Image: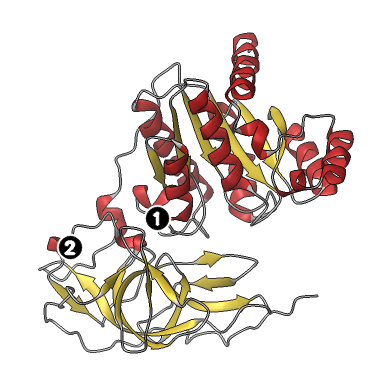
């Protein structure tokens, strides 16, 4: 059984640190993916006397390289990290059973780089197979000329809803992290493109990183958005009502681009607290027409499909890591009574067209 490393709780009350009113020199700093929507000309100073909040941009120095040896930059390139490097990342929480659980610190103090996409946080727990996190020394939160912290929310897309009728929408859910959700979504997009359909995509939940976004773009999705587009570096510990608005806004902007179909990816597994709340919401049921469920094994597939059916959601098929094994795929098909769709089937234009025909027929009957 995996053992969790736990750090002591921080001080209850943040202790103020003297402000640094100088304008930071950012031209030599490595700027993380998580900051890519921020216009750097808005940065006019740096302060170390504020209480950090999720989404605040922080200038920090690498003090010790650990688990994350590279930082994903705004353009997607992964830059090697060295002690003494200055980086610009965002404060945020993280939920990753295979890596770290982290939270926003209560004050500006030494903490960790907890995600390669550029998330700074206080590590709470870690999987026993990952290395110690990369350690950073924050110099302060970046501010505007008048001293207000610069936050991702300042560049969030405006709230919107899809026009009615909205395009058919398929959500990709799964049993856990690394069950094959993003790969499923990408191959589905590829198949839809081969069927002559324009697909747009959005990653609704997770931790800010570009890998999934770039993969969906490479598969042919346009546009592709994620939760950082609406001002969140991470969706861990985001209130259910706010998370519903994240989904609605992302879906609305993708649909407004004139796509034929929207593909939504929801991170982690059905028992993760934000995923559980979102998939059980009325907003999710009203937005999503069908679900592809990614699983690592047949038992997970059967339990996940059963749960989704109880929520009144239409499950189109089982996908994910389970399809790598013909034996496990047969078990999943027997246990769920649903088609099991491997990557070849998902990426086939004819199969995608049939999937869309079934979905359109189901919508017409509602």
Instruction: Indicate the quadrant containing the C terminus: top left, top right, bottom left or bottom right.
Output: top right
> What residue is drawn where x is 36% and y is 63%?
77
Mark 1 vs mark 2: in front? 2
Question: What numbered label is drawn on residue 303?
Answer: none
Please name the residue that numbered disc 1 is placed on.
232
Q: Quadrant of the N terminus?
A: bottom right
Quarter residue 56 falls in: bottom left
Residue 81 in the figure: left or right of residue 361:
left
Total marks shown come to: 2
In percent of width and height, residue 157 lies at 30, 43
Which is more N-terminal, label 2 or label 1?
Answer: 2
Q: Assign a secondary structure to mark 2.
A: helix
Which residue is labeled 2 in the image?
Answer: 40
Q: Residue at x 87, y 44 (%)?
A: 327
Image-based side of 139 in relation to 329, left or right: left
Q: In which image quadrant can residue 50 be found? A: bottom left
> Is residue 111 among the parts visible in the rendering?
yes
Q: Position of residue 151 (x, y in %)?
A: 28, 61
For the point 48% across and 51% down, which residue is it? 212
Q: Nearer the viewer, residue 66 or 103?
A: 66
């Amino acid at each position: 059984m995996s053992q969790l490393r736990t750090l002591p709780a921080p001080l209850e009350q943040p202790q103020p640190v003297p402000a640094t009113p100088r304008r930071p020199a950012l031209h030599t700093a490595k700027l993380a993916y998580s900051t890519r929507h921020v216009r750097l000309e808005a940065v006019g100073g740096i302060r170390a006397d504020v209480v950090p909040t999720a989404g605040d941009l922080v200038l920090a120095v690498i003090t010790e390289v650990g688990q994350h040896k590279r930082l994903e930059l705004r353009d997607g390139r992964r830059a090697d990290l060295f002690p003494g490097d200055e980086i610009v990342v965002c404060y945020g929480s993280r939920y990753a059973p295979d890596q770290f659980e982290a939270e926003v610190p209560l004050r500006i103090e030494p903490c960790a780089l907890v995600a390669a996409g550029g998330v700074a946080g206080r590590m709470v727990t870690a999987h026993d197979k990952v290395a110690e996190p990369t350690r950073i020394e924050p110099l302060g939160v970046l501010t505007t000329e008048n001293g207000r912290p610069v936050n991702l929310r300042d560049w969030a897309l405006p709230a919107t809803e899809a026009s009615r009728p909205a395009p058919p929408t398929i959500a990709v859910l799964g049993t856990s992290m690394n069950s094959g959700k993003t790969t499923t979504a990408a191959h589905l997009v590829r198949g839809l493109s081969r069927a002559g359909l324009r697909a747009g995509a959005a990653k609704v939940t997770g931790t800010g990183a570009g890998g999934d976004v770039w993969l969906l773009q490479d598969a042919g999705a346009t546009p592709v958005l994620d939760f950082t587009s609406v001002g969140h570096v991470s969706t861990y510990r985001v209130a259910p009502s706010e998370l519903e608005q994240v989904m609605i806004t992302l879906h609305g902007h993708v649909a407004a681009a004139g796509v034929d179909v929207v593909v939504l990816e929801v991170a982690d597994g059905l028992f993760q607290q934000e995923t559980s709340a979102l998939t059980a919401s009325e907003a999710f049921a009203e937005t999503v027409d069908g679900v592809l469920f990614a699983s690592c094994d047949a038992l997970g597939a059967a339990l996940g499909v059963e749960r989704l059916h109880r929520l009144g959601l239409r499950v189109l098929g089982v996908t994910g890591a389970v399809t790598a094994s013909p034996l496990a795929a047969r078990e999943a098909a027997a246990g769920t009574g649903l088609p099991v769709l491997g990557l070849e089937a998902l990426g086939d234009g004819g199969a995608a067209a049939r999937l869309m025909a079934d979905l359109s027929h189901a919508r017409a009957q509602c």
